[in-house]
Image (spheres, helix red, strand yellow):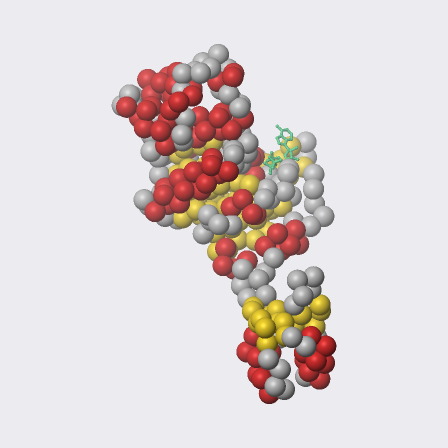
Amino acid sequence: MLSVRGLTKVYAGRPVVDQVGFDLQPGTVTAFLGPNGAGKSTTLRMICGLTPPTAGGALVGGRPFTAWPNPCYAVGALLDASATHPGRTGRGQLQMAVNLTGLPARRVDEVLDMVGMTQYANRKIGTYSLGMRQRIALAHALLADPPLLLLDEPINGLDPDGIRAIRALMKMHAARGGSVLVSSHLLSEVDQTADRVLVINAGRIVADGPVAMLTAPTHRCLVRAKDMAKLAEVLSWQEIAVQPQPTGFLLADATVDRVSEVTFAAGIPLLGLREEERNLEEMYFQLTEGVHQ
Ligand SMILES: Nc1ncnc2c1ncn2[C@@H]1O[C@H](COP(=O)(O)OP(=O)(O)OP(=O)(O)O)[C@@H](O)[C@H]1O
């Protein structure tokens, strides 16, 4: 559906996107994560032919974006919600796109409904909030029902209802066999929605894998007993390192099975025992550490 190879952009001798390569499969939501200035927007703009690459390229449905006679049928892109005419109404903006592309007029009402903007459609874009402009830009991307959606920070400015709606929309798009690449600088914005995470830092892909990869077990566990001193003592006898947690649990450097065996053998009744959950935000910071441009 999308194939990116060796994509590179150099500005003033500095590579801001450096040999980026990945493929997107149908039926998936991929999060494109990285801190401010990591190269996300530049990558998306190059895929859409808005920024010429210094090297490499991208194929959308087998051909470059610019080789599509009408690219809106191949890709729906939300790249810059402010790139709209403030004097036009939301409906007028979409109507114009429909006229230019030969899409059926009913699509305007359909996409307005999909993004929850029907009631504001006849207001001028200049009077919209950031979240409303995002919704109209998203409606624009959805007009031709393209298989691939490229969404650059779509959650920006959205209220909780809007966030929920866009998450549902992305999942639905993937469930219908489409593919979504959604950029964000916050892992927590996308970890519930994405199947896969691509992490970019200083122009390079530093991690690429299923969300489950980032949430793989740590082989440590959290344990709590009525007699915490006794618990700590028994675990240390077995050379299991422990760290007290603010939650009242001990973080034990051993699996749930091992801690369960040890405490059972020592006759310590447990009040709680569970696997440690990997802290996704922490992991993300480790991957992108120290490089903020
Ligand atoms: N037209 C340009 N000329 C020079 N430098 C640019 C240009 N566009 C982007 N850059 C630089 O390229 C780097 C990557 O920018 P980009 O907008 O792609 O990052 P981003 O990951 O989308 O960041 P953000 O999360 O802040 O939107 C930044 O250092 C930015 O200053």
Residue in the picture at 49% in, 59% down: 212
The percent coordinates of residue 176 (x first, y second) are 32, 44
Q: Visible in this render: residue 93?
A: no
Residue in the picture at 44% in, 30% down: 138
Left/right of residue 288 with respect to residue 114 in the rendered view: right
Residue in the picture at 58% in, 71% down: 272
The percent coordinates of residue 222 (x first, y second) are 61, 69
Q: Nearer the viewer, residue 143 or 208?
A: 143
Q: Is residue 137 placed above or below 160 in the rendered structure?
A: above
Q: Visible in this render: residue 14?
A: yes
The quadrant in which the C terminus is found is top right
Left/right of residue 56 with respect to residue 239 in the rendered view: left
Q: Nearer the viewer, residue 133 or 210?
A: 133
Q: Nearer the viewer, residue 170 or 205?
A: 170
Q: Quadrant of residue 68?
A: top left
Residue at the far front: name it: 226
Q: Quadrant of residue 91?
A: top left
The quadrant in which the N terminus is found is top left
The percent coordinates of residue 34 (x first, y second) are 60, 44
Residue at the far top: name it: 87
